[in-house]
Amino acid sequence: MSKQIPIEKPKNAFPWLIMILMSSVTFVGILSELMPSGVLPQMMADLDISEVQTGNLVGYYAIASAIFAIPLISMTMHFNRKYLLLILLAGFATSNIIAGLLHDHSIIIVLRVIGGICAGVMWPMIAAYGMRLVDEKQHGKAIAVIMAGNTLGISIGMPLMTFIGNEYGWRTEFIGLGLVIILIALISVFALPSTPGEKLTKSSSPFALLKIPAVLLVVLLTLLGVIAHYGVYVYITSLVDEIQLAGGIESALLLFGAGSLISVLLAIKYTDKHLRLLTIAMFALLIISMTVFLMFGGTKGLGHFAFFLWGLSFGPLVTLLQAAVSRQVDSAIDVATSVQSSVFNLSIMIATSVAGLLLGMYSPMSLIYFAIALAIPGMIISFFAKKTLG
C-alpha cells in the first residue's frame, strides 16, 4: 500500500495552474475560430472580397474541424499528449500570423483550414488530457475549468479582440493572437506534464462508440442544445435590433458574458456531482430566457435580464456535454470527445444555415421559437436520462 501513496497524493490535489494553462489554450482556440466575424468590414475592404466570402473564413474553419476531428484523433491516439498539444499550438500560431501578413484570399482560406484542422484535434484531446491528470472524481471539474476558456473567449475575448481589430486593424489582431499562442506554447513546454498516448482498438473506435446508446443520447442532446443556442447567437445583433434593447449589442454581450461567467463557476464546482441537474437547468434557462424575449423583450430592463439568463444557460454548454460523453467510456476518451466535438461543430453549421433561412423568411423572433422548440425536448430527455447523466 505504501507504494501507492506517492501516486495518489498528486491526483487528490487539483492541479489548478495546469488546468488554467489548458483553459488558456481553449480561450485562444475559440478566438482563432471566430475572429473574422468581428472584423468583417475591414477584411472585406482590405482583401477586396464579398461579405459572404469573408463570413466563409469562419465556415471553412468550422467545416475543417468537423471533418477532420474523428479521423485525426484516431490517428494520433498513440502520440504523447504534451507533444501533440505543442504541435497544435504551433499550427494555430502559424496560421494566424501568416494570415495577418498575406493579401492573397485563397492562401488565407488554406491557412484557415489548417487552423480548423488543429482545432478539430485540440478540442477533444485537451479535455481527455486534463482528465488523465486528476482523480476520477474530479473529471467533471477538470473539463469545466479547461472548457471555461471557450466560454470566456466568446463572452470576453471576442469583444476585446474586436476592439483591437477595430482600433489597430485586423492584421494586428491576427498577428497579436498568434504571438499570444506562441507564449502559451512556451509556458506549456515547461509546465505541462508529459503523458503517453493510448492504443486505438476496435472496441474504442468511433464506429464502436456510436453503437453505445448512451453515447448516441449525448450526441442527440448536443444537436438539440447547440442548434438551439447558436441559432439565436449567430444573429444576436438582429435580435438586439428587433427588441430595440437599450445600450445595444454592447450591453447585451456584457450581460450575456456576466451570466456565462457565473454559470461556468457553478459548473466547475458542481458538474461532477450534479451533471444531470445542471443539464436540465441549462435547457430550462434557455426556454425561460427565450420566453422573456418573446413576451417582454421590448420592456425596459426585462430584455437585459433575458440576456443575463441566456448567458447562464450558455456558459456550461460545452462542459456539460463533454463531461456527459466522457462518462460513457472507460478508455479512449479522446475518441469519444472527438465524436461529440464533431457533432458540436456540425450543429453550429446546421444552426447557422437554418437560422439564416428563418431570418430570411420571417422576423428575428422566429429564431426564438426555433430555440424553444429544440430546448423543450432537450430538457425532457435530460430529465429522464438518469442512467446516462447520473
Image: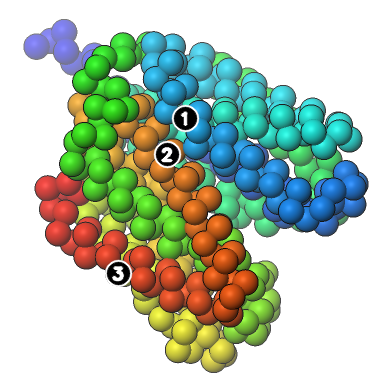
As drawn, the label of residue 376 is 3
Q: Earlier in the sequence, mark 3 or mark 2?
A: 2
Q: Which residue: 84% across, 40% down?
A: 171
Report the side of 260 relative to 204 (left or right).
right
Report the side of 322 relative to 188 (left or right).
left
Q: Earlier in the sequence, mark 3 or mark 1?
A: 1
Question: Can the viewer see residue 303?
Answer: yes
| Residue in the foreground of this view, choosing between 280 and 65 | 65
* 2 and 1 marks in contact (CB < 8 Å): yes
The amino acid type, in three-letter code, at marker 2 is Ser
The amino acid type, in three-letter code, at marker 3 is Ile
Measure how far apart labels 3 and 2 are at the Cα level.
22 Å
Q: Quadrant of residue 102?
A: top right
Q: Which residue is mark 1?
A: 69
SS label for mark 3: helix
The vertical placement of 172 against 246, above or below, is: above
| Residue in the foreground of this view, choosing between 276 and 291 | 291
SS label for mark 2: helix
